[in-house]
Image (cartoon, rainbow, N blue to C red):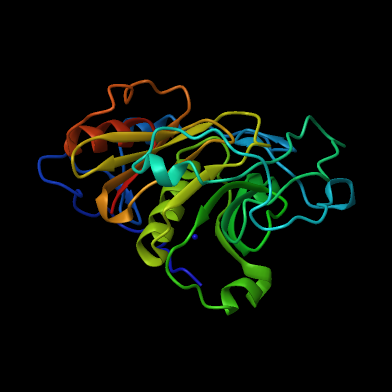
Amino acid sequence: MTMSFATEGPPTPSAYSGTPKRSSVAGLQISPTAAREERAKEPAGVGSPHGRVAREGSMFSLGPATPGAGGAVALSEGFSDEAMRGLKADGARAKGDGADISDLKACGVGCYLCYKEDNFGTIYMQWAENTPANAILWMQPKAPVPKFKFTQNAGRVQLADRVNGGLKFFETISRFVRELMVTYKANKITILSHVENKEVQVLFLKKSNKIFILKEASKSVLYEPDEIEAIGVVPYNNTEFAVMTMHRQLFCDKCAHSGAYMMK
């Protein structure tokens, strides 16, 4: 999401009863079949396998932005329609190497999930007042955040490297979302609109077994953290959750088969 994330370790019991044992990363359930399907990819450039993102450097320098600035963003179905109508966010779509993204606007103060091509794909979180380079996902906390989170190491905490081409990418995103939700009561999440290549969808399972999905760039979901039971991250083209209602065990099984999940 400094946040403490457990590193890879020995298998742990399933997050719910009746589920076959799977290899585990910080509580993430991964099927052996899916793990074997991981494949290597070349280091990503600006058009990374996980979205076309702003890259640090003079060619991709960000212009000034005011927290909360931007046009109205399209909102997906969420938990509070009235509150969601007030959510604002916007961004510029990078079109390739050398693209001018100086008009990139900030989602606002919060924690950003960022991707770089270093080390075969590196994901880190960054606390910032404006949208930083490399940002692909934004969450806004409700709970107070210590000031040093924004200043220590420029607000950055590395979460994982070598994430290209495997389940590790999904695992890292799910850990980020859960940590922000649990520790900082984050209740807003946005996939930034300059992310072109759609790679993932973020799933929220409510205690009522209702599912809300965030998959469209520049769309946001506003939710109540206390109502969430599980978080899933799966490939963008996965259609198994279109039913919008699912029992917890089935939800977790399906997430583990193609991506990752974490119990809140």
Across and down, in percent, residue 9 comes to 35, 59
Is residue 139 visible from the viewing direction of this image?
yes
Q: Is residue 78 left or right of residue 96?
A: left
Query: In the displayed structure, does residue 241 sit left or right of residue 128?
Result: left
Q: Is residue 207 above or below residue 66?
A: above
**Vertical placement of 106 versus 40: above or below?**
below
User: 15 and 68: which one is in front?
Assistant: 68
Relative to the observer, which residue lies in front, 73 or 30? 73
Is 167 located above or below residue 151 in the figure? above
* Residue visible at 66% across and 50% down in the picture: 119
Number of on-image labels: 0
Left-right relation of 179 to 24: right
Q: Residue sitting at 30 percent across and 57 percent down?
A: 10
Q: Is 126 positioned to the left or the right of 204 in the image?
A: right
Q: Position of residue 191 (x, y in %)?
A: 55, 40
Q: State which quarter of the image contains the C terminus.
A: bottom left
Query: Which residue is at the front of the view, 44 or 141?
Result: 141
**Could you say where residue 36 lies in the image, as x and y percent from the top left?**
40, 32
> In this rendering, does residue 8 appear at all?
no
Looking at the image, which residue sits at the far left? 18
Residue 84 position by quadrant: top left
Q: In the image, residue 225 lies at what x, y percent? A: 32, 54
